[in-house]
Image: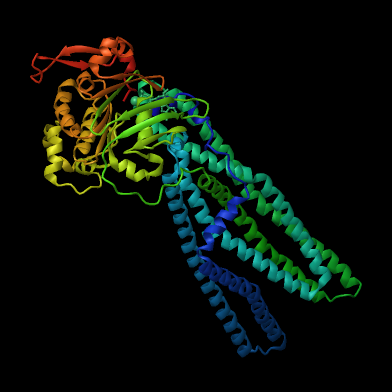
Amino acid sequence: MSGHTPRMHGEYYQGAMLKEPPKSRKSAWRTIFNYLYRYRVLFLLAVVMIAVESILTSIVPDFIGKITDLISDGLYSGDIDLDAITYNGLIGLVLYAIATLAMYLRQYWMSGISQNVARKMRSDLQAKLDRLPMGFFDNCRKGDVMSRFINDTDTVGSALARGLPIFTHGILVFVILLIIMLVMNLTLAVVAIVSACTGMAVAAIVMKRTQKYYRNQQKNIGRMYGLISELYTTHDVVLAYSATDMNKEKFDGINEELRVSGFRSEVTMGLLPAIMKFFGNIGYVAVCLVGSIMVIEGQITIGMVVAFILYVKLFSGPLDMISHSLGSIQAAGAGAERIADFLSLGEMSLDVESDEEKEVVGKVEFRDVHFGYNENEETIKGFSVVVEPGQKVAIVGATGAGKTTTVNLLMRFYEVNKGEILIDGVPIKEMSRKRIRDMFCMVLQDTWLFEGTIRENIAYCRDISEERVMDACRKVGLEMLIESLPDGLDTVIGSKSSLSEGQRQQICIARALVDDSPMLILDEATSSVDTRTEVVIQNAIDSMMSGRTCFVIAHRLSTIRNADVILVMKDGNIVEKGTHDELLKKDGVYADLYHSQFEIVEEPEEESASGLVVSAVVPDELKPGME
Ligand SMILES: Nc1ncnc2c1ncn2[C@@H]1O[C@H](COP(=O)(O)OP(=O)(O)O)[C@@H](O)[C@H]1O
Ligand SMILES: [Mg+2]
């Protein structure tokens, strides 16, 4: 919401990433495996393919070795056994072909699985977003959430597509080679295994200590997204306040942190293979040494040592695969953690299953309502009022008195802390949120427009005829504008530049005009349109209000004066209640407000018999933001 822009200058970026502390770090991979579980059959098939590939790649060298032996034997004897060579060669070829096919299949399946997992994660995040309470959006940073949707799911996806299969393949080849070695010679196998395991253990320690770099990396990417989206959406504010220098500083800070965390995770990613290689070489030397001693002592033949040395060399293959894929697996762990954190945030209370679809009469009652946006600060303090069906209620009060908050509570955007709000005698807690929102039609000071045509914005997912849309436009004074646009109603809007704030409000009011909801909420709905247009709109609004229960927060005195009841709010409570005349007579807060905030200006056209209309002018310091 645009009302939050001023917070950009301040602590906005230093706040916590998410409101609630993250759950256990261990849940990251559990999250991933929970997702994988949905594709367990394909995943198992892929694992089988990895196994086939691993076994074949471990065996094929044997055939190549046989061919080499046959050739060298033939060279000595002068009679090369071509048939045997062809036979072994063909087997080797077929095995290679199968291995390649297995590799293709596992890549195909794992790519499918990984993209499906990423998609499912994104849709789960999206569904979660719908279940989060309004309070989350007040405090969250858009970019950080965006980065969870886009960057973190992608990191997990690519680790599943490439990192995990390569890792598994490496482990399997490693195990197969181990078995072969164990069968060949126990002592030498133990030597090779000990050195390899030491290498793995060291790598594991390094991994454990460097996971934080990956975590920082993902976090900093989120912050960068946040800053960019904020700078972009508030570009005009930044320019107007000459805040470019300050923002440059902030940007440079995050950019630098991103460099450092990126550098560290890259270094780790490069360091791991080096460590593994080092211990691989140690194993190689150890096998040579121990093997030679054993040969001298006559325990084994030289051939055995040579074979072993070859296998220890082969060992570096899987170790390489393992160490190279560890980086992406670590990054995926960090990404999954952020996704799991988001998915474990506290949600809104569950909606009731089904509503009684009764006709809405329009009686609204606030019963000793208490509410605070934060735990330690109460914004609404014991608000009580009964609104009869069809009554027009005007809510007035200084900025910050709690008018919008009251309306937010009525719409159940937030849950009350204490007390109750009832519609037609039923507590809104016992209704579904959708039903409550369907009961009301709402026009706010913060215009709600989305990227789309004017027609789509007015019809808003409902099936509404062209005539009705055009009629609504006429009533709110948009006719001239629409006629001047080459595409008319089909002009695409949404970006700030194309329409003035007043025109945006006019569209929102037109949207309300074609809405048949039984109750109406107008929160400073005409604050940005000029007095002349306002008079036009007022007729539309008056017709819209007739016969409905209405809550109007307005600065325009004529609206307030025609209200059946005026609620004067101060510091989160109703301090006065009554009609305009009653309240003036009382000479209390309302009278004060009336004299200080509203002034009488000359009426531009007919409308009132006296030629004068009382209109409100909001003092400068009370004017909303800098939109
Ligand atoms: N989303 C929010 N989070 C925290 N505090 C809020 C939020 N919205 C409003 N407030 C605070 O609640 C108080 C009442 O605000 P509001 O109901 O918007 O006043 P108004 O009467 O001008 O509409 C103000 O002090 C405001 O700072
Ligand atoms: Mg307000």
The residue shown at (11%, 32%) is 480
Q: Which residue shows up at 61% across the image and 42% down it?
A: 213
Q: Is residue 357 above or below residue 615?
A: below
Residue 463 appears anywhere in the view:
yes
Instruction: Give the vertical position of 547 relative to 35 (above or below).
Output: above
Identify whether 382 is placed above or below 263: above
Ligand 2 image position (quadrant): top left
Q: Residue 113 or 457: which is nearer the viewer?
A: 457
Which of these two is toward me, 206 or 510? 510
Q: Residue 259: x percent and y percent? A: 55, 38
Is 108 placed left or right of 452 in the picture?
A: right
Q: Does 506 sit left or right of 484 as displayed?
A: right
Whether residue 1 is visible? no
Viewer-nearest residue: 287 or 167:
167
Q: Residue at x 56, y 54 (%)?
A: 31
Image point (35%, 18%), residue name: 398
Quadrant containing the N terminus is top left
Residue 30: x percent and y percent? 59, 55
For this orientation, the residue located farthest to the front is 425
Residue 285 on image: x %, y %? 79, 61
* Above-or-below relation of 134 to 529: below
| Depth check, front residue: 530 or 179 | 530
Q: How many marks?
A: 0
